[in-house]
Amino acid sequence: MSSSADILYSRGRNDECYTPRYVVEAILPYLRKDFVYWLPFDTEESEFVKVLRDNGIQFVSSHIREGKDFFKYEPEHWDAILSNPPFTGKRAIFERALSFGKPFALLMSNTWLNDSAPKVLFKGHGLQLMLFRNRIQFNNQRKITFSSSFFCCNFLPEQIIIIDK
């Protein structure tokens, strides 16, 4: 049986991809001021932490390196999940997110839509997507070969929102 660390972080070290500020800013208009957002894959250096703090949005952040494993830890009070999870182990991550019955927006590769997992997981839950016109350049890399979107549940006012960036 794999540990959470094995599921969350691939041995190839491809899962620590840092989200650019503009991506977090794109979802800001859809955040509720009366919510506390759980950022379960974020440290103080995260743009999610910085942008939410800069905009007066309440949040609690956590990270496996702090001993706060997403599969075992849950903050005492939170209303919605927002983050860029590791792409490895995505099915388990989305299963856990859906299990709470609360809204979430998690950044994920669009190639996952080729898999049956999101179709099975989101059936009856209403998958919402925030699509970006261009590929997100994680870690300021210029050779990202895939597009990513926020995969959401009960988070956006529409099923599909397209961001012109």
Image (tube, rainbow, N blue to C red):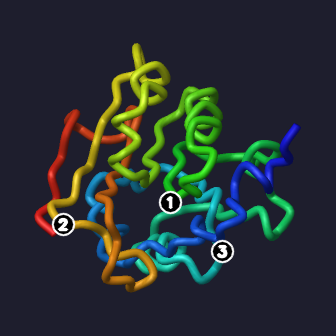
**Crowding near pointer 2: few (<14 within 10 Å), some, many (20+)?**
few
- Identify the residue position indicated by label 2 in the image: 134
Circle number at residue 84: 1
Residue 2 lies, in percent from the top left, at 84, 43
Mark 2 element type: loop
Circle number at residue 43: 3
Q: Earlier in the sequence, mark 1 or mark 2?
A: 1
- State the image quarter where residue 87 is shown: bottom right
Residue type, mark 1 in image: Asn
Q: Earlier in the sequence, mark 2 or mark 3?
A: 3
Label 1 to label 3, Cα distance in Å?
12 Å
State whether residue 140 is above or below residue 9. Answer: below
- In front: mark 2 or mark 3? 2
Q: Residue at x 41, y 56 (%)?
A: 33
Whether label 1 touches label 2, CB < 8 Å: no
Q: Residue at x 30, y 36 (%)?
A: 128
Circle number at residue 94: none
Residue type, mark 2 in image: Asn
Residue type, mark 3 in image: Thr
Q: Earlier in the sequence, mark 1 or mark 3?
A: 3
Indicate the quadrant containing the N terminus: top left, top right, bottom left or bottom right.
Answer: top right
Q: Nearer the viewer, residue 87 or 69?
A: 87
